[in-house]
Image (cartoon, grey):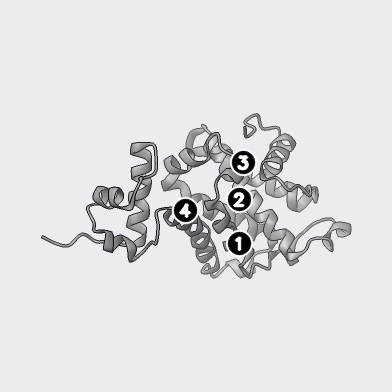
Amino acid sequence: MAKKSISASSIQKGFQDYLLEEGKIPETVRIFTKYLKISDEDFYKYYGSLKNIEKSIWKDYFSRTLKVIQNDPEFEEMDGREKHLSFLYTLMEIVKPDRSYILYKLENKKPHELPELQGAKKVITDSDIDWAKNFQFLPDKAQSITQSAYKQVLWSHSVATLIFWVKDDSASASDTDVFIEKTTRTAFDIGELPALDSILDLSKFFLQKMGFSKAPA
């Protein structure tokens, strides 16, 4: 009998399946490894604790997104807005297979209630993204955008998009595509992005500006 293939991603997938089937995270590593039919030793080769699995899931969404777009030979030729759009659309393609998991995590919850998102945020804030220099803001605002501020904008816009996506019941989540396009246009063309601390406030601002009815709770 062939040995079961074990990897960090297979453990992530097993964790998501357990969470969706049981409605809670495993109480112990032993309960989880028994569910996966692997040994505790195999588990600890990849993760030091159960909570680190969810942190890695969210970090991987964003690190994989950056890897995909940066490996695109056409990416460097894009302007700031195109790079911003490329990031968001690629992120949505990467998370699409995990919609049920993300719905479970984000529905009726606020981002600050999910500490695992902070590790994912660092993927963006610690990256060498330099797209802000290509902003097409109005001239009087162009100089006021710093690199770190843009990374916060990208992070907030990403989470706002995920919040909208989990509430989007349109066919093929087509409303989310419209949300991405129109909110990006608001930020880049109108130059009207507010200096808000709250991801939910940013999301509500976008929704109000664009006339969407599905405002995040």
C-beta proximity under 8 Å, tags 2 and 1: yes
Q: Nearer the viewer, residue 73 or 116?
A: 116
| Above or below, 203 relative to 119 | above
* Of pointers 4 and 2, the one earlier in the residue sequence: 4
Q: CA distance from mark 2 to mark 3?
A: 14 Å
Q: CA distance from mark 2 to mark 1?
A: 10 Å
Residue 132 is situated, as x and y percent measured from the top left of the image, at 73, 63
Label 2 secondary element: helix
Mark 1 = which residue? 124
Task: State the residue at coordinates (32%, 50%).
Answer: 14
Mark 2 = which residue? 158
Task: State the residue at coordinates (61%, 61%).
Answer: 124
Mark 4 = which residue? 94
Task: State the residue at coordinates (50%, 64%).
Answer: 68
> For the C terminus, which image quadrant?
top right
Q: Amino acid at mark 2?
A: Ser
Q: Quadrant of residue 17?
A: top left
Badge nearest the viewer, 3 or 4: 4
Q: Amino acid at mark 1?
A: Ile
Q: Quadrant of residue 138?
A: bottom right
Q: Which mark is residue 163?
A: none
* Of pointers 2 and 1, the one earlier in the residue sequence: 1
